[in-house]
Amino acid sequence: MKYWSLLLLLCPLLAPAAPVLVAEADKGQDELVIPYRMYRLDNGLTVILNPDQSDPLVHVEMTYHVGSAREEADQTGFAHFFEHMMFQGSKHVGDQEHFRLINEAGGSMNGTTNQDRTNYFQTVPANHLEKVLWLEADRMGFLLEAVSQRKFEIQRDTVKNERAQRIDNQPYGLVGERMGELLYPREHPYSWQPIGYVEDLDRVDVNDLKAFFLRWYGPNNATLVISGDFDPEQTLGWVEKYFGPIPTGPAVERDLPSPARLEHSRHQTLEDSRIRLPMLYMAYPTVYLGHEDEAALDVLANVLGGGKSSLLYQQLVETGRAVSAGASHYCAELACTLSIWAYGNPSRDGSLAPLKRDIDGIIAAIAERGINADDVSKAVTQLRSELILGLDSAEGKARQLSLGQVLKGDPLYVINAWRQLAETTPADVAAVYGQYLQSRPSATLSVVPKGKTEWQVAEPDYQTPERQLPERAHIDELPLREVVDNFDRSHMPEAGEPVQVQVPPLWRHTLGENIRLLGTVNDEIPAVSVILALPGGQRAESEGELGLASLTAAMMNQGTARLNNGDFSEALERLGASIKVRSGFYTSLIEVTSLTEKLPQTLALVEELLFSPGMRELDFEQVKARMLESMAQSRHQPSWLAQHGFRKLMYGETRMGFPDDGLPESVAALTLEQVRDYYERFYNPANGHVIVAGDLEPEQARETFAFLTRWQGAIPDLPQVQTVPQPAEAGVYVVDVPGSVQSALRIGRRALPLDASGPFFHANLMNFNLGGNFNSRINQNLREDKGFTYGAHSYFTGNRDAGVFVVATDVRGDVTVPAIENILAEFRQFKADGPSSEELSYLRSSYSQQDALSYETLGKKAGFLLQLAMMELSPDYLSEQQSIVAGIDAGELTKVASQWLSLEDMVIVVVGDKAKLEKSLAQLNLPVHDLTID
């Protein structure tokens, strides 16, 4: 002992040096600046600290500068695949323990991969920060000790399921992949997508994956950002302790920018059996992230297709020539593209050639129209508003700091890019228009329904080169990094003292006789979130009026009598504000977001919209046509078919049994007079609620919303909600989608109406370990043990009058029946045995701490207040919930399970290829029925 102590005294340089401060920024007078301190460890790890005591939570974000662009052309999908592997446990963290520990702490977590980086992030109550740092360090330093061939194969299946669910089995799912191949040569790393090609994953083994980790997952290629309620000195000590001993990885150089280059325009066609609306997608190569022309190109894209006042929307969508259209300038580290898209209207003419001519004409006309100062001002205002609203959460601040540092070496890059945008002139925008767009070659993809190649823009004139896949040399066992610690890393840090969660302080007021205001004051950012909840919604529709509530809300989004749709949208863009109207089951909702400085002007527009909506005949015809096309397209989406097929079987011919937007035949028959009548009756603020969260004092709010008392009109009578017992008998109901590579499953039954602390709440406690979180039995069985699916979950859901219990998942087509059998087996076991003692502890821990994350942003605060108002709750209900969770036992949960998990009551909806499934479904020994979705 004395020998080692003496050695340490004589050789202090053997110990890692303290983290070095390399950059810092203070808040100053600029509300956009995120204050931070940036440090660097001896091993190259970059650490950025952003203390913020506004909420009792912390967000930890680890970003590795490796995305699909770092992959070899014959090893695509590795970066994304590795994202999955990073959640599979490490030397000191058991399988699936990372998810469990974060959920148990009441936190949330995930990871994402794009072309340029992979990030892993978690938000937890502040007292769990040390544990999160220990977890992140363990998978950085010790992941490979826990990687096995079996884990590799399971996650490979999971990635294949993800690709099938998100790309191969989705309408338009292959557009991104085909555009990458059309724009870039095969050797360019942006020519493939982060999900990669399945054949590449099939050609490798676990050692290929280990080699990828050793090359790219060193601390010198990582940036750790911590934002939230923490002590900087203590946190820096933890970072040094857990990350400092991890050896530096191989040197990583920044790749040189490599924008696409097109000598001539290229055309290809994609036939998609899952679509109804043809789509035109065009891409113009431009610059790269951080280029001096980036800001001007952003403005140009905004003028073209950035919103309802844009050229594309006004000239294509408002005229009915397209169902939707837009443009964006997407910038990545190596290349940017200015993309234009439009969905054709097959009810008028499915051909995309006229649409392409229209778009070409719009682009050409910019030369004569020019770019004015107002174009630039709108873009600057919108981005500033987005930046301020993004500062509303620790995650938003950490994401900005991380993105800037990893991709550009500047934590404040996003804010500095806005400053560049603010200095952009109309002449700058005109210059980039001439350089990158006017008469320049583009890559054009025609996406048409199967068998409708006559709708394409042009005959395909570019053949994507075949992929060259050389034989891969087998990689032998690789040496692992050796980490030398002076502490016992196997000991997981204990959580600190529980945080004190404060429910946002509330204020209440009544306007006039019956308009109730409920609000909370928060000045963390200079912004306000408002929700007007007006009694009515879908329940107020009369017989034969299915979809009227949704159609009326859509018409309310079309401007006022004074301002047409484009002018109204432009007025909002000048303010950096948003006003959205939508329908719910019980209410029509007007949702408003505004910077505090612009709130009076924003609410003046709300008042004008509420008292004098446009309701124009031409708008009505266009809105209804777009709604009908959208409804037709949704019938091609497996998840929609499964959800609404299940809903139909649960609620029958009642309003809850039909889609929110109604049925095509009912919407087609609706008239503008019916919409106007619904507006007059049910956009009455009487008995409504006004929810206010943000930088607005109660006295100001009372004065600001006094205009609502001027509404003239009788208070409408609202019908009773009709409910019937579950009309469908237990059995299997098949929606046939020929050629489907997956089966979308919904398994469940009628259950309970919504409540805050009664039977519905108890049922969800029961479901927590069955299918209510990532580590639940159903998800672990189908995803992690079997590799059947990308994810599976179960839940109780409903409204004040009725509800259901349902399991939802998409599985590989060839394992449809085994997946169903495994889900039913989980029902039987949970019904018989209930939760284990470990699961009960997990439930209590997770629920007892999750409120720390519940009120962070203005949106979350407003949502919480809306729930209080709609369900007539006191904030004390949260304490009641915590008491229930603390006192509930396994016996009570088992009793709840026995009530709701009986197999005799279960309805099974299968959306898939009936011809391939029919024989195997018969093995379930259950009645099998065909199900048609209207």
Image (cartoon, grey):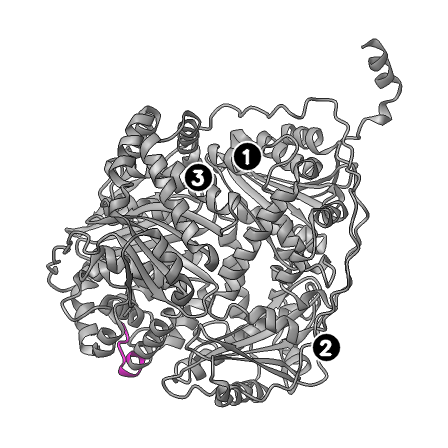
> On the rendered image, what quadrant is the N terminus found in?
top right
Above or below for 402 versus 457: above
Q: CA distance from mark 2 to mark 1?
A: 46 Å
Instruction: Examine the rendered structure and indicate whether residue 364 appears above or below residue 224.
Output: below
Q: Is residue 616 magenta?
A: yes
- Which residue matches tag 3? 776
| Quarter of image, res 179 | bottom right
Mark 3–mark 1 Cα distance, whole angstroms, equals: 12 Å
Mark 2, secondary structure of its residue: loop
Give the label, 2 or 1, closer to the camera: 1
What residue do we see at 42% from left, 70% from top?
738
| Residue annotated with mark 1 | 97
Please state, as top left, top right, bottom left or bottom right, where the C terminus lies in the image. Answer: bottom left
Which amino acid is tagged 1? Answer: Glu
Of the two numbered discs 2 and 3 on the same chain, state the one appearing first in sequence.
2
- Secondary structure, mark 3, is loop
Q: Is residue 933 above or below residue 386?
A: below
Q: Between residue 763 and residue 553, name the one nearer to us.
A: 763
Q: CA distance from mark 2 to mark 3?
A: 49 Å
Residue 599 position in % (x across, y down): 39, 58
Question: Which residue shows up at 66% across the image and 63% down it?
Answer: 332
Furthest toward the top, the residue is 2
Give yes or no for residue 412 being in the magenta stretch.
no
* Residues at marks 3 and 1 touching, judged by CB atoms closer than 8 Å: no
The residue segment tinted magenta is 613-620
Report whether 709 appears left or right of 154: left
Quarter of the image where one finds residue 430: bottom right
- Residue tagged 2: 261
